[in-house]
Image (tube, helix red, strand yellow):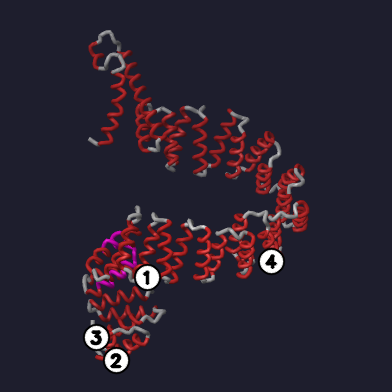
Amino acid sequence: MNRKLMKLVLVIVLPGIIFACSGSKSIAQQDVEPDVTIDQQELRIEEQKQMEFEYLYVEALKEKALGNPQKAIQYLSGCLEINPNSSAAMYELASIHAENNDFTSASLLLEKAISLNSENKWYQLLLAQIYQQTRRLEQAADIYDKLLQEEPENLEFIYMKAMLYASSGKTEEALKAYNQLENKVGLNEQIAVEKQQLYLKNGQVDKAFEEIEKLIENDPQEPKYYGLLADLYQSRGDSANAMKYYRKIKEIDPDNGFVHFSLANFYLQNGNLTKSFEETIEGFRSADVDIQTKLQLYLMLTSNPSQSGINADQEEELINVLMEAHPDEYLLHTVRAESLLKQGKLEEARTEILKALEMEKNDYVLWERVLFIDNDLQDWEGLQKHSSQAMDLFPNQPQVYFLNAIAGIQLEEYDETVAVVDEGLMYVVDNKGLEGQFLMLKGEAYYKMGKKQEAFKLFDESVELDPENHIALNNYAYYLSIAGENLDKAERMSGRVIEKFPDNSTYLDTYAWVLFKKGEYKLARFYMESALKFDEDDNSTLLEHYGDILFKLKQTEEAMKYWQKARELGGYSELLEKKINERNYYD
């Protein structure tokens, strides 16, 4: 018998046992009680079902509270088997489905529950939230409208109704709801601004102005309202009135930093880039404006310089002003680092991020950024040092172990690499790709240590876990070709790589060399010539390999040219010297 089914049977039988021990006659005894009527027997069965239902329902609520949703679902499903019209069970089941983002099941259950019990507002509120999540905004608003018939003074219901109608594009209904709310709470800034936006959307510009003017009339010393009015005039193309109200803000609140940003936008829209930048600088200097607001504006300006008119020198000036105004804010060093990275200044960018880490060493994202820059710079000692520091701070992050292992391979510290890989693998959870990459590095270390067969076994495991790891596929194919083993397998792996990277000289060289080792010299020459075409670094290994291929094609003089060129480019080795001196190929 299925174990889950057995458990469910035991759960259902248990209340029956409790009932049998309660002092009443047992079910079995009913057959020998001639005075018990059929109606009484049915009543007892119904009572037993009710007790089973109550038991399952309580257990479901308990499991839900304990954070065991699947068990709760099982119990609630049992409830609905006993009573298919239990709106309470449907509601609880729907709430679990909603938490699991299964909004379809949740909404169907709630719609059924409401059809059975239309008076329960909690059912309707949860359904409204689900409709909102699934962008059925008008239907959500309609639910709040119905709820207001029972609770006409509920301000939250009125606000939600207004907001949802506004979001669904039902402008008139939204305005009515906001007016209803305003009648109850009085003049309110948030409501006025919402109405202003709706009036603009509806083409009722005069009414939009009236909303802001009401706010100013109610509180004439609040500079924010003049800013809203100025922005509204500016959006209508009335620069004169816009400037009039921006100046009014300066008059009321001379130290207001936000007005500088409004003026910067004003000048930008009117094509005065110099004045726009000057106002931006003033806003960045202001102590009244928080650092987050400044950073958001900085990112907006620098992410689209063609629109903002900010050039590289001005970007640097903005950063300098920010750092003067907020010398203890570590994030500003990361801002400068990103600016330097855009200019390709990797070392300077790394220096800035390291400064940030001196101020806030527990930011993992920054450590990862440093490690990737180390890798891009091929600064293997730096990568080893920084990844070791990150391993101490974040011992559960497998990525830092992986990068440390890369440094170990490059620094030829193979024993240490194997140890780091084994430690890092302990923290890899449900990530076959990363696990495969770890095994690739361990395989590299073993291969360099002369443990060829152990390395090949690890490469097999690596590519099985991560069949798209082109580095593992390429290196494994190359090592097999050098060993002269499994050349068909090597050709298949290398072929998969060059299908994805047909213009990568390193991968083309591997494929050509595999073909060479198989004796397919003409085809090998074709791919090696492709590799040389895409080689931007004048790689001496590729030149030597091409010479080897030409020699096998009986083009000895041409082979000698490429062997000599390989030596000139720093590819000296005893084997290459022997080829040149003896005008012969040696494996």
Q: Is residue 61 above or below residue 522?
A: above
Residue 256 in picture, x, y percent from top left? 71, 54
- Start and end of the magenta stretch? 460-480
Q: Which residue, given by chain and number where applicable, does mark 2 sit on?
A: 557
Dot 3 or dot 2, earlier in sequence? 2
Dot 4 or dot 3, earlier in sequence? 4
Horizontal side of residue 157 vs 283, given as left or right: left
The residue under label 4 is which amino acid type? Answer: Leu
Asked if the magenta segment contains residue 478, the reply would be yes
Between marks 3 and 2, how big is the CA–CA gap? 12 Å
Q: Which residue is drawn at 30% across and 81% down?
A: 545
Disc 2 packing (10 Å; few <14; some 14–19; many ≥20): few
Asked if the magenta segment contains residue 259, the reply would be no
Residue 306 in picture, x, y percent from top left? 61, 67
The residue under label 2 is which amino acid type? Answer: Glu
Residue 86 in picture, x, y percent from top left? 41, 27
Secondary-structure class at tag 3: loop
Between marks 4 and 2, how big is the CA–CA gap? 66 Å
Dot 1 or dot 3, earlier in sequence? 1
Dot 4 or dot 1, earlier in sequence? 4
Q: Is 421 in front, or is 430?
A: 421
Q: Which residue, given by chain and number where applicable, does mark 1 sit on?
A: 501
